[in-house]
Amino acid sequence: MAERFKFSAKTVFFAMVVVNVLFFAYARLSLDNRAGAASRIEDLQINPGRINLLNAATRGPGGQAPKSACLEWGSFAAIDAGKAEVALGRLGLPRPPLQRTVGESGGAKRYAYYVREPDAGTVAQIAELQRSFAGTEIKAGPCPS
């Protein structure tokens, strides 16, 4: 029995030596490839030259000019439009409101005012003005061109 144990121990010893040599060779050849790792990192980084756009942009520098948000207040008859313009002038808006024709009613043109990029305070002031002009509405949407 003693010789069988020696034979078995020698086999295990040589098998462990072979496994260690193979692992060492594998580790040296594949795990410590720093040049390969550096090239993979560069491949993962964003390269603007390799970006392909699938559809044309509708906003920003790649497409049309961006649409800004507006508050639309209207519609007014010609008589009320002048009063509304004076009331908007008293608010001291950073940009003057845009007046646009929005259609006709009973043969008379109807007008609406557009306030660009209003803040919460401006919206509240216009809502207060709107109460004194019956039949008008306030809507948010894109500014007209």
Image (cartoon, grey):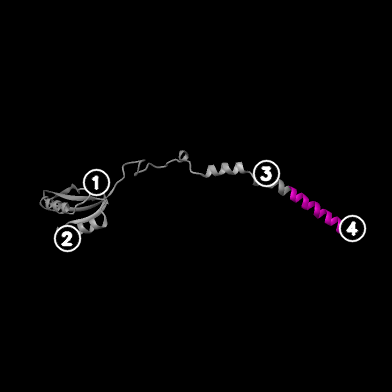
Which marked residue is nearer to the observer: mark 3 or mark 4? 3
Q: Residue at x 89, y 60 (%)?
A: 2
Q: Nearer the viewer, residue 108 or 26?
A: 26
- Which residue type carries mark 1? Pro
Q: Horizontal and vertical percent for residue 104?
A: 14, 49
Residue 53 numbered mark, or none: none
Residue 131 numbered mark, or none: 2
Q: CA distance from mark 2 to mark 3?
A: 80 Å
- Which residue type carries mark 4? Glu
First in sequence: mark 1 or mark 4?
4
Q: Horizontal and vertical percent for residue 141?
A: 27, 51
Q: What's drawn in magenta, residue-wise?
A: 1-21
Q: CA distance from mark 1 to mark 2?
A: 24 Å
Q: Secondary structure at mark 3?
A: helix
Q: Residue at x 10, y 51 (%)?
A: 79
Residue 3 numbered mark, or none: 4
Contact flag, marks 2 and 3 (Cβ < 8 Å): no
Q: Which residue was labeled with disc 1? A: 144
Q: Residue furthest left?
A: 79
Q: Which residue was labeled with disc 3? A: 29
Q: Is residue 63 above or below residue 138?
A: above
Q: Secondary structure at mark 2?
A: loop
How packed mark 2 is, by other alpha carbons closer than 10 Å (few <14, some 14-19, many 20 or more), is: few
Query: Is residue 63 toward the left or the right of residue 144 in the image?
Result: right
How packed mark 3 is, by other alpha carbons closer than 10 Å (few <14, some 14-19, many 20 or more), is: few
Q: Residue furthest top?
A: 49
First in sequence: mark 4 or mark 2?
4
Q: CA distance from mark 3 to mark 4?
A: 39 Å
